Amino acid sequence: MAEKIIETAYAKINLGLRILGKRSDGYHEVSMIMQSIGLSDEVIITEGNGIEISTNIEGLSCGKDNLAYKAAALLAERYNIVPNVHIILNKKIFMAAGLAGGSSDAAAVLRGLNRYWNLNLYDDRLEALAAELGSDVPFCINGGSAIAKGRGEIILPLPDMPENLVVLAKPKNLDISTAWVYKNYNPQRVINNPGIWQIAENITHGARAMMPYMGNALETVTIPAHPQIALIKTAMLKAGAYFAMMSGSGPTVFAFADNKEIAEKIVEALKDFNVETAITTTVGRKNI
C-alpha cells in the first residue's frame, strides 16, 4: 500500500449540450460533448481513521454527503475493504459552477483508491462505479474530449482537441441547482440545438471549426432567471473572445481566446461584474 497518492481532478466544460427528452427514471436523456480543462483540484490520499475528508474551502461539507466520501465508501463496500483513509481536497475549481468540481473529485478518489488499495481495476469498471455516484463522474475518470449520452454516464471517447485558451467567469454568490435547471427545462424555448455529431467530427480542428455547431440548451433556463450571465457573455465577446457560452447548468461562462493577451483583456473587462475568473487551457485525455 502506497503511503500517499496524489491525483489531479480536472474541471470540465460542455462544448455542446442537447436534451433529447425525459426518461422513465425521472432523469433527462442528454447528448453532450464534454471537454476537460486545466483548472483543477488536488486530491491527496493518505492513511486515516475510517473515511476522513478535509478541505481548504470553509463551509464545504466533509461528511457522508460529500461526493468524494461517497466514492470512497462505495469502493470500500464493493470490494470488502475496511477504509482507513484521509482524503484531502485542495480545491481551486469554482464551487456549484457547472464545471463538475465535485464529480471530478469523486472520480479522482476512485482512481486514487484503486491505486492505494492495489485493486487494479480497469477504466471501464471505474466508470461503471462512477455512474452510481452521478452523471458527470464517469466522464471525469479519463476526461479529455468525449461524447456523453444517456443521463451522462455513457462515455464515447473522442480524439483530443488541439489546446485552446479558455477564460472562465463565474458570478460570485450565485449557486445554481442543477436539479432546478432540469426541472424547469422547456424544449419549446430552444431555438438552436447544438450539432453534437458535427462538433465531434470537427473536434481535431479546434474550437473555431466547432463554433457553428456549439450550443447549450440549458441556457434557455438559467439565463432568463439570471440575466447577468448574458451580460458576461457579451462583455467577453466585446473584449476579444471569439466564442462564449455557459457551461452545463451554469452559472459559469467560458470563452475561447486566440492568445494570452486577449485572455487577460477579457478578464480585465469583467472586473466590474463581481465574478471569479481563471485563464486555463483545454486538456487532452492523455494528460489525465
Image (cartoon, rainbow, N blue to C red):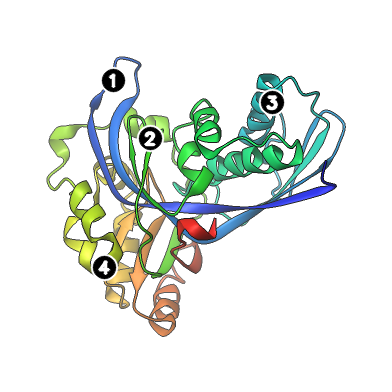
Q: Which residue is mark 2?
A: 152
Please identify the quadrant where the C terminus is shown.
bottom right
Which comes sooner in the sequence, label 1 or label 3?
1
Q: Which residue is mark 4?
A: 205
Badge nearest the viewer, 1 or 3: 3
Q: In the rendered image, is residue 54 in sight?
A: yes
SS type, badge 3: helix
In the displayed structure, 185 sits above or below 241; it is above
Image spot of residue 279 (x, y percent): 48, 70
Please identify the quadrant where the N terminus is shown.
top right
Local crowd at mark 1 within 10 Å, few (<14), some, or many (≥20)? Answer: few
Measure the C-alpha gap from mark 2 to mark 4.
24 Å
Local crowd at mark 2 within 10 Å, few (<14), some, or many (≥20)? Answer: many
Give, as a three-letter code, the residue at label 4: His
Can you name the residue that lies furthest to the bottom here? 261
Badge nearest the viewer, 1 or 4: 4
**Is there CB contact under 8 Å for labels 2 and 4?**
no
Q: Which residue is mark 1?
A: 23
Local crowd at mark 3 within 10 Å, few (<14), some, or many (≥20)? Answer: some
Q: Which residue is mark 3?
A: 73
Measure the C-alpha gap from mark 1 to mark 4.
34 Å
Measure the C-alpha gap from mark 2 to mark 3.
22 Å
Q: Is residue 66 left or right of residue 54?
A: left
In the displayed structure, 56 sits above or below 154; it is below
